[in-house]
Every structure is written in structure tokens, then in C-alpha cells.
Amino acid sequence: MRLIVLLCLVLYGCGEAKRPVVEGDPERGRLLLRQFGCGACHGIPGVADAQGKVGPPLAGVARRVYLGGVLPNTPQNMARWIRAPQEFDPPTVMPDLQVTPEHARDMVAYLYTLE
Amino acid sequence: MKWLAGIAAISAAAAAVVIYAGLYDVSATDQHLAPTYRLLDIAMKRAVRRRASNIEVPELGRPAQVQRGLALYRSHCVQCHGAPGVAPEPFALGLTPAPANLAYTAREWPAADLFWVVKEGLKMTGMPAWKHRMDDDEIWALVAFLQELPRLSPADYRSREAQRVAASAPAPLAAADAGRGRMTLNQYACVTCHAIPGVVGANAPVGPPLAGIGARGFIAGVLPNTSHNMVRWLRSPQSVDPLSAMPDLGVSEQDARDIAAYLSTLK
């Protein structure tokens, strides 16, 4: 039995997909997500008090295919979405929080650790 | 007893090796071994017979009913199964198992079994379940047509398909049912894009996970999450957000209500 479990674990690890390289500082991004109040609307693992249920949970967002249901998920697109959601989906309730390009990059660096 | 447990453990380990090393050929070009095919065929027929045994067969064969069945056959079946003198589409020829020639099946099988297979579909074949796409009257009309099929020459088939029929009035709506909704989610392939608690499948992260959707404030980030709005969204996402990647899957009003009822239980 132990052999089977071990085998499963070893072989399961082989299926890892390639992840894009993300610039920015994930640790600073984590703090910024808190500063900008993202957790009021989203559940975000690792961000204190981020238990919001207005929008979708961000656990696993690095693997999600679309952002806001409209934009293909790449680190560049995520930064653009965070900075100006209405530019990509005019009816979205996600607000434009005046995030700077640098801050957006750090937020993306953290969000891309959420697999 | 100890050696029995030993054999079981070794068999399980061997099966695990075969599975994880990828030794089993899942390609559609690799045909089944003859005994495997025979066994699967028997298992399928026995399973259908068992489940269809309580189905009451209505009167079949009225000309209008057969003609309606032909129209349905042309829109939903001929692509894979072909018809007298008509080949299946190229994509259907690549399926394993190959879709059956229904002129033969219809002659050999009881009407109730045909009805059940059309309605429920067959797992791990290309045969879809039609219960969410056709109502029982339509499926019986199809069965009535299938029973005619062995008696139709290619020329008969061509002349009959030229005739047209009107669609019937839609069935009245039943109360929303969360249990039915959970089964219905599978029938619209929702798990190919969403992780959904209680539904087994790919659960791929194309769109957001639906765990907790019952408590979420907004649908798709644009629509306040009420059951009415959820039905509206499920039936026509682009009318809510023209840019959405969520496709219009032709969900019926009843199915959308059932699905919304199930989703509202995911808190």
C-alpha cells in the first residue's frame, strides 16, 4: 500500500505545467492587496481579513484562464485588469482603484503564487 | 488469508504501475481486444435492459409522429449514425466505438431500450444524453422513426426528409429542483470550465470556481446574484455581458431554474 501511495505521489509530480516568469515583489504585493482593500470583495489566501464574497475567490487565480470572464490571463493582462477593469469589461463592478503600474506588478507577482 | 491479501496488494500495485506509467492506450485508433469489446457490449445491453424494463411504451407509428421523428433524426442523429444511403460525418468515423447503424439496432432492440439510450446516453461512448435537449414526446417520435428505418430504402429516406413538420408546444415548467440541477450541470458540460462541488469531471479553472457561489455578491462581476438573475445569466450570458467568455449553451428555462437552485445551495 505504501508503495502505491509513494508511486502515485512521485508520478503525480511529473505533470507540472510551465508557469510564466513574473516580475515584481510578491511579498510587497501581498501587503498592497491588503492596503487597497481587495479582500473586501475577494477571498485571498495569505492576505489578512481577505474574506470578501462580492467577486470570485482568488485562490488558484494563477491557473485561471480568463480574468473577469473576458480577458485571457497573463501577468501583463492581470496588471492591466487591476489598473483599469472598465477598459476591458465596461459593465464590471470591479472598481478602478487608481493602482500604479509598479503596485499592480507587485500584486500580480503575489497573485501568481496562488496556484 | 495472508497470501490472499498479498496477491491483492501485488495486483493493485501492478494496476497502479500500468495506469501511472501510461501503458494503457487510450487512443481511438487502438481498437479494443475482441473479448473486451464483447464484454463491454454485453454489459451495456444488460444495463440498458435493466433500466428500461419499467418504461411504458406509448402507441408508436402515427405518420405525423414518424415524420416528426425524422426531422429530429436529421437535426441530431444522422451526423454520427448516418441514414439509408447517407454516410456519417467525417468526425463521427473517428469515434471508438463507431456509432451504430440504427437500421440494424432498431430492428433488434425493444422500443423501451431505444428510448432509454436516446434519453440517458451512454457513458464512455460518443452517445450523448438527449433528455435536456428533447422532451419525452420528441424522443418517442424519434423511436417511432427508428422503427421505420429498417423498412426505408435510400430513395424513401430522401423523399421523406424533404417534408417538413411543425414543432410542438413547450412543456409546462415544474418547481425548481436542486437535486435535478446538480445532474443537469453535467449535461451542459459546466465542469469543463468551472470547479463545482458535487460534480465530478475536469473541474478546470477556465472560469471562477463555483464553491460559495450561493453567497457571492455578483454573477460574472456584473449582475447582482439573485435566482432570477442567475437564470437570466445561465440562459444568455452575452445579453448580460457581451464580452463574456461564457458561452450561450442553449439552456432551457427549466434546466436553468434547476441549476440555479443547486448553485444557491453552494454557500
Image (cartoon, coloured by chain):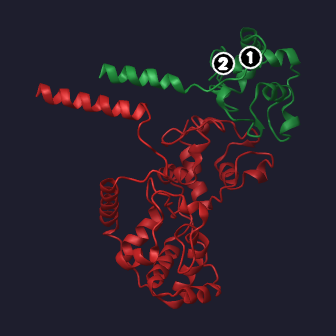
Q: Residue A34's x, y, as percent?
A: 73, 15
Q: Which residue is mark 2?
A: A113
Q: Which residue is mark 1?
A: A109
- The reply to whether the C-beta atoms of the residues labelled 1 and 2 are less than 8 Å apart is yes
Please tell me how crowded label 2 is: few (under 14), some (14-19), or many (20+) other residues with Cα within 10 Å: some
**Label 2 residue SS:** loop
Residue B33 appearing in the image: yes
Q: Is residue B200 left or right of residue B57?
A: right
| Colour assignment, chain B | red
* Residue shown at 62% from the left, 35% from the top: B205
Q: Residue B150's x, y, as percent?
A: 44, 83
Q: Residue B179's x, y, as percent?
A: 47, 50
State the image quarter where residue B57 is shown.
Answer: bottom left
Which amino acid lies under the numbered mark 1 shown in the image of this protein? Ala
**Label 1 residue SS:** helix
Real-space Cα separation, disc 1 to disc 2, in angstroms: 7 Å
Please tell me how crowded label 1 is: few (under 14), some (14-19), or many (20+) other residues with Cα within 10 Å: many
| Colour assignment, chain A | green
